[in-house]
Every structure is written in structure tokens, then in C-alpha cells.
Image: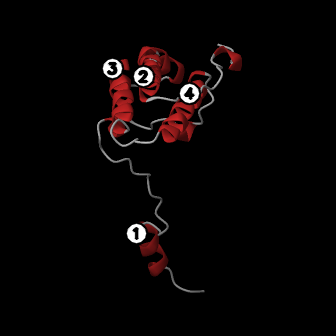
Amino acid sequence: MATIPARLAKATKSIHSWEEARSASLAAYRTWYRSAPEIVQLYGLHVSPTLVRMKIRQDFERNRETITDLSVMNIMLLKNHQEFQETMNLWKQECRRCPTPAVWRGRPWRTPTISTREPEMFQEEDANQSPL
């Protein structure tokens, strides 16, 4: 599918009341929720759309009680739409996608560490060689 940036573009609106903020955030949640199967298909994720929807719900509920300022809510809604547009236009880089389903199940994601020391088998060979 070709990337059409204008497909998801919309003008930014400023929210002036908590009722508007609630309706805008519910609309954003519904948009993400409905697009879960398409996200799984576009990115070739090895998880079900149900698991993606669960993660979307966790992200929205995490900010439910913490935001108490309308200006912060405006910024969060703007960033939410930007994130959605980048996701649906396949503008995400490989490292920005969820690496494994373990992250979605609440387990911490650890970056694989690269050992800088030599394996023991090479250390033994060096010790057995006679210096020339």
C-alpha cells in the first residue's frame, strides 16, 4: 500500500473544556481500537489484534487520572494523533515497534547484552601455546 500522508491529516483543534477533552480522547481511543487488526497486518506482528487492543487500552488508562491540566491534554491529543498517523503510514522505525509480546504482557524488555570478553575456549588455547 502506498503511503498517502494526507489520508490521515486533520487540523489541530484546541480543547477548551473537559467534556470536549473526554469526547476527543474517546474518539482517539476508538480510532486506535478499530485499527488494531490493520496494525498487526501492516507490521507483520506475531500477536493477535486482541493483544494489541489490550496494550492500547493500557496506554489510554495510564493517563486517565494523571492529566489535570487542559493544556497538557491538548498536547497529549496532538501527540496521540501524530503517533497514529506515523503508525498507519508505516513511518515507524524497526526499533520503535514493540519487539516481543513479552512487553505487552507486562514483562520488562531487556536489550540483549553483547559480551566483550573472549569465550573460555579461546583463553585456554592462548595459555597452552608457547611463546616464540
Q: Which mark is residue 29?
A: 2
Of the pair 22 and 52, the residue shown nearer to us: 22
* Circle nearer the viewer, 1 or 3: 3
Residue under pointer 4:
81
Of the numbered discs 4 and 3, the one sitting upstream in the chain is 3
Give the Cα distance between marks 4 and 3.
Answer: 21 Å
C-beta proximity under 8 Å, tags 1 and 3: no
At x 33%, y 39%, the residue is 65
What kind of element bears circle 1? helix
Of the numbered discs 2 and 4, the one sitting upstream in the chain is 2
* Circle nearer the viewer, 4 or 1: 4
Residue under pointer 3:
50
* Circle nearer the viewer, 1 or 2: 2
Q: Amino acid at mark 4?
A: His
Position in image of residue 92 (x %, y %): 59, 32
At x 48%, y 59%, the residue is 114
Of the pair 111 and 19, the residue shown nearer to us: 19
Of the numbered discs 2 and 3, the one sitting upstream in the chain is 2
Q: Amino acid at mark 3?
A: Thr
Position in image of residue 28 (x %, y %): 47, 22
Residue under pointer 1:
120
